[in-house]
């Protein structure tokens, strides 16, 4: 497939996930419709999976795709459908590297990525390969081509769920650049001419539509940590330029993610309950009340040492509203993957902080103990 002119595709997006189609691409679409943004998106398919390549071909063939928003936000029921028109085209990196490199050199202004749980895994990959395997090595090779062409730097906005994702991605690219090119001027260009931005994303995009499209919840957030010289790729009420991501990360990890993990604990206690989805748990009065008690009596009083209580309560309310979304089949079995590890990351820091403050956490203690017992019994 041959891409048309991509002169207006100033955003290069690595990843074809339904999340990005229902999150970043939707924000860019709305910003273009409002006249705030001129850039469109070039989507890049990066994995060797044939299913992923077929999705890329479908996206190339359609480009305009439906986004269905269903659920409740701020007490209002929402069920809408719109056509997203922000995608200019989609390239398959393994098959169309020269076209991708040319676009990256000539027209790119922003890089966006959401490359999955192993997206930052490099192993023995090299950016000197004809087509590197890993996302960091692909990005390093493309940045070196842009630098060698005498072009200015660009803004990198990773969306992977990794703390300080911009800083971590820069560290990986610097390591690859120093090993593969050993060019001090290129190293300096990476840090002085490019902006590496920490971001946090939050939206449940619950289903894909065939051949291209997505179903998402109304709630959305793209928090982007400010730094000198930062220009955002779009304007939207759910795209927020913030001084620090710390509060956003803390709320998401220790309220929303913690609540998901606590529901898994409750689900594992009653394996024959017949409850499969988060929304079904919230429809069960006993389960919903217990989760609310955990948040109100153990979590929020503990987090209030660091964050404003009113902000915590507002985020709690939004979280419970999202969990009760009647359109969202968010399976507890899926959330239960790596449950002991999630308990350690999401629950244990709250327990330790509560203990220092003299706050009792009996339900969180029970959840941690159960997770540890399961691990030790294997």
Image (cartoon, helix red, strand yellow):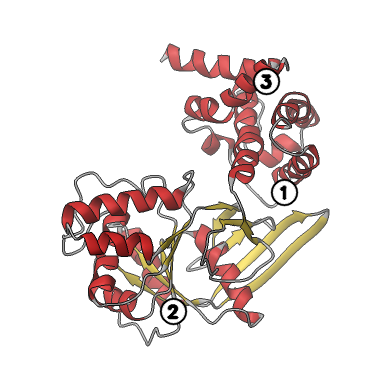
Point out which mark residue 325 bears.
Answer: 1
Residue tagged by mark 3? 354
Question: In the rendered view, does 293 fall on the left or right side of 26?
Answer: right
The percent coordinates of residue 354 (x first, y second) are 67, 20
Q: Disc 2 designates what residue?
A: 9
Quadrant of residue 12 within the rendered picture: bottom left
Q: Nearer the viewer, mark 2 or mark 3?
A: 3
**Number of dots carrying numbers:** 3
**Dot 1 or dot 2, earlier in sequence:** 2
Q: How far separated are the C-alphas under marks 1 and 3?
A: 30 Å
Q: In front: mark 1 or mark 2? A: 2
Mark 1 secondary-structure assignment? loop
The one nearer the camera, 144 or 203, is 144
Quote the CA–CA distance across marks 1 and 2. Answer: 35 Å
Left or right relative to 229: residue 57 = left
Instruction: Give yes or no for contact between labels 1 and 3 (Cβ–Cβ under 8 Å).
Output: no
Few, some or many C-alpha atoms within 10 Å of disc 1 (few <14, some 14-19, many ≥20)? many
Residue 277 appearing in the image: no
- SS for dot 2: loop
Location of the N terminus by quadrant is bottom left
In three-dimensional space, the C-alpha distance between marks 2 and 3, rounded to whole angstroms, equals 49 Å
Nearer to the camera, 9 or 275: 9
* Residue occupying the point 31% across, 65% down: 189
Mark closest to the chain's N terminus, 1 or 3: 1
Q: Position of residue 93 (x, y in %)?
A: 28, 67
Q: Look at the image and tell me in which quarter the C terminus lies.
A: top left
**Furthest residue in direction bottom, as rendered:** 5
Indicate which label's residue lies in the foreground, 1 or 3.
Answer: 3
């Amino acid at each position: 497939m041959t891409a048309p002119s991509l002169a207006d595709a100033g955003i290069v997006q690595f990843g074809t996930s339904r999340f990005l189609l229902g999150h970043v691409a939707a924000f860019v679409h709305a910003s273009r419709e409002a006249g705030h943004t001129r850039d469109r998106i070039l989507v890049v398919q990066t994995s060797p999976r044939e299913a992923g390549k077929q999705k890329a071909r479908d996206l190339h063939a359609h480009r305009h795709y439906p986004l269905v928003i269903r659920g409740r936000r701020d007490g209002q029921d929402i069920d809408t459908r719109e056509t997203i028109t922000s995608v200019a085209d989609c390239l398959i990196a393994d098959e169309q590297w020269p076209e991708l490199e040319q676009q990256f050199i000539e027209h790119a202004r922003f890089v966006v990525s959401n490359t999955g749980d192993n997206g930052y895994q490099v192993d023995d990959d090299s950016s000197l390969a004809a087509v590197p395997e890993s996302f960091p090595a692909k990005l390093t090779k493309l940045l070196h081509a842009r630098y060698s062409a005498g072009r200015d730097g660009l803004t990198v906005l990773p969306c992977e769920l990794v703390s300080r994702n911009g800083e971590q991605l820069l560290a990986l690219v610097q390591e690859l650049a120093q090993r593969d090119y050993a060019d001090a001027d290129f190293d300096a260009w990476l840090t002085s001419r490019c902006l590496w931005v920490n971001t946090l994303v939050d939206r449940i995009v619950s289903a894909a539509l065939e051949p291209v499209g997505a179903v998402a919840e109304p709630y959305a957030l793209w928090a982007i940590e400010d730094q000198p010289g930062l220009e955002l790729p779009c304007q939207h009420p759910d795209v927020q330029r913030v001084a620090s991501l710390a509060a956003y990360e803390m709320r998401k990890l220790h309220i929303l993610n913690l609540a998901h993990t606590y529901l898994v604990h409750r689900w594992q206690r009653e394996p024959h309950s017949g409850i499969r989805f988060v929304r079904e748990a919230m429809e069960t009065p006993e389960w919903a009340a217990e989760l609310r008690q955990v948040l109100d009596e153990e979590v929020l009083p503990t987090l209030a040492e660091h964050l404003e209580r009113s902000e915590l309560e507002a985020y709690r309310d939004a979280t419970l509203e999202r969990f009760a979304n009647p359109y969202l089949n968010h399976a507890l079995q899926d959330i239960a993957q790596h449950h002991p590890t999630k308990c350690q990351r999401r629950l244990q820091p709250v327990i330790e902080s509560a203990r220092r403050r003299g706050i009792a956490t009996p339900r969180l203690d029970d959840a941690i103990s159960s997770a540890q017992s399961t691990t030790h019994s294997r």
